[in-house]
Image (cartoon, rainbow, N blue to C red):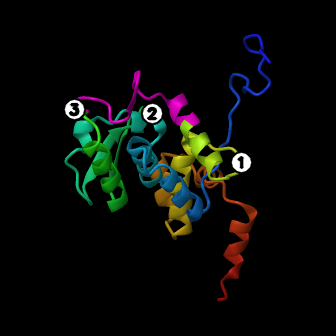
Amino acid sequence: MAFAKGENPHHPRRGDSIRVEPIRSKRHIANIKRILADKPRDLCLFTLGINTAFRANELLSIRVGQVRYLSVGDTLTIKQRKTGKYRSVVLNENVVDAISNYLRQTSLVDEEALFTGLRGCLTVPTVNRLVKTWCADVGLKGNYGSHSMRKTWGYWQRQNGADILNLVEAFGHATQRQTMAYLGLQPEDVMKLYDLNL
């Protein structure tokens, strides 16, 4: 069914926000990596996204030369378009392996964007569509998109005991409340706080 411009009932109205979820299951993360195993660009994008918490537009700003020679423990620094600040992350083994595997199978030169398609650099809407597809393909129910990668990083950092103040800083949020809401902590996550016997 065709809709006139602006009449699609499934499209959000201008100014509306859509909240996407983190991937709360390591099994689903592993399954996404498995289905992307023969798509090195997509596997690299996903792995970088869930291990660095960069926004989609920041991931898409990365040039091949910024990452080609990086090793585990090296730092990748990107200017955040939203805040204008620079943010540095330390690359782990999964990220370095994914980048190396991708670059071995592509002829991209150092000046080119790392994540390209047939028409040039990928766009944020394309990344959003890719993440939705990957999540649906592994049976995830809910709303997922490009921000799900960033949220997944934060969610698992928190599950691993990361201090909320460090996460506030990493995300560039103004308050702890904003970060908690951003991470989509569920009531059962809050209830777990009461399992501690003092």
Marks 1 and 2, Cα distance to the nearest angstrom? 23 Å
Residue type beneath disc 1: Gly
Residue occupying image coordinates x 67% and y 74%: 193
Which residue has dot 3 on it? Answer: 109
| Residue 115 part of the magenta segment | yes
Q: Is residue 46 above or below residue 159?
A: above
- Where in the figure is residue 160, as x and y percent of width and height? 51, 69
Residue 123 visible in the displayed image: yes
Residue 24: quadrant of the picture: bottom right
Q: Does the residue at mark 3 contact the one at mark 2 (Cβ under 8 Å)?
A: no
- The answer to which of marks 3 and 2 sits earlier in the sequence is 2
Span shown in magenta: 108-129
| Residue 63 part of the magenta segment | no
Which residue has dot 1 on it? Answer: 142
Q: Which mark is residue 57?
A: 2
Q: Is residue 173 above or below residue 122?
A: below
Q: Secondary structure at mark 2?
A: helix
Residue type beneath disc 3: Val
